[in-house]
Amino acid sequence: MRLLISFAALFLSIVFLQLGSGGLGPLDALSGIQLGFTTAQIGLLGSAHFVGFFIGCWLAPRLMGAVGHSRAFAAFTAIGTIGVLAHMIVIDAYAWALMRVMSGLCVAGCYTVVESWLQAKATNENRGRAMGTYRVVDIGGSLAAQLMISVLEPANYVSYNILAIICCAALLPLVMTRVEQPAIPFAPRLRPDLAWKLSPLASAAVISAGVTTASFRMVGPIYGIEVGLTVDQIALFLAAFVLGGALSQYPAGWLADRFDRRWVLVWLSVLAIVTCAITVAVSTGGSVAVFIASGLFGFATFPIYSVATAHAHDFANDEQRVELSAALMFFYAVGAIAAPYLVSTLIDGFGPEAMFAFVSLAHVILIAFSLLRMRVREAESKTNYIYAPRTTFIIGRLLGKSREKKPDAPDS
């Protein structure tokens, strides 16, 4: 019973963290527009978030080793809350970028603590249920965070105060639990060369996933405003993207387990390009058409990260899985850091359609690279496909026991 209560506390903290931090990106974009920031400056805020995210992934295991799980969680939450509250005190795009580094560091640090706790407390008997619940909580919290934008007034102190209060609430379930804190986890080495050595295609695919997701979630509100959506409608526009991604996980996993995963990546990229074209084509066709296009875009692009990581793990042994997951997260962060600023600059020069042109180009390159890699070597026997959250370097350890070779799966 105490273990179930411990899991419930972790999941409740994740919900509050998602609501507090997940709503900050779109709120910053809308606030920046209202305050007169340039499009490039708004994109810089999204890039800054992922800079902080990467730093947090690297720093969190070391801080836990120094002060323990609960204190580390409290420290990261405090950093994020300070960043949120400071927004309306200093109205400057570059100061906000520093605050977004703080929020990214908070998200990565808190997720690292939670995933480390789950890894230590989960057993073979409850691991599947724990991870299934974790995925539902993560996606559900992200979906709710996008919808919050409809009730938060841009460039308003009260809106940022509400997000700060929710971030603070994330502290309560975890730090008040009476369950003993787990041992400090081993911090995986960051070896990007390992991912590239095992699977250059998977490395390229997670970069493409980072480019796609970060572009849409961080710069999508700018696109929405440019094509005439209201603030309430932008919340639904972003939520449709997340919902489409959630609905695609099962069919993408089914396909990835039955066919060559490289061809699955190719066809997901083809579908991504098609949905980019559809989204641009229906931009003047009314809000419902734009929402549907957003959902289709999420359906096509969300699974790419999980399919790519599954493909990379097909070539790894059990000793390599944790460091491989961390390396793939590094490549994802590279794409996510670069994309928002580049996309916002392109929108400044060529209009809102440039965002989807840039994403389409990334997927054209991925298709070409996939076809090239198919000529270099055959596919390996498959590991189990699992939905891989793009959270921290610790996730590889948490999911490690789920990635086993399928003895009866044919090479393809």
Image (cartoon, grey):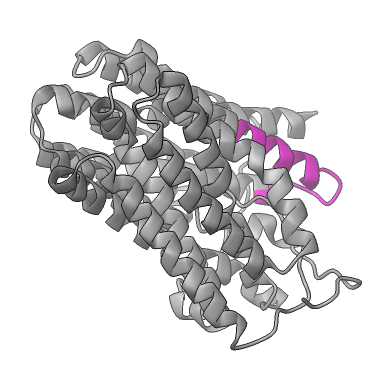
Relative depth, front residue between 241 and 367? 367
**For residue 126: magenta?**
yes
The front one of 109 and 324 is 324
Q: Give residue 35's position: percent from left, percent from top.
A: 10, 24
Residue sitting farthest toward the bottom:
376
Q: Position of residue 412 (x, y in %)?
A: 77, 76
Q: Is residue 195 visible?
A: no
Q: Residue at x 45, y 71 (%)?
A: 190
x 17%, y 29%: residue: 32
Q: Seen in the image, is 205 located left or right of residue 256?
A: left
- The answer to which quarter of the image holds residue 34 is top left
Lateral position of residue 310 relative to residue 61, left or right: right
Position of the N terminus by quadrant: top right
Quadrant assignment, res 228: top left
Q: Main secondary structure of the magenta part?
A: helix
Residue 251 visible: yes
Q: Which residues are magenta?
A: 119-138
- Asked if the magenta segment contains residue 124, the reply would be yes
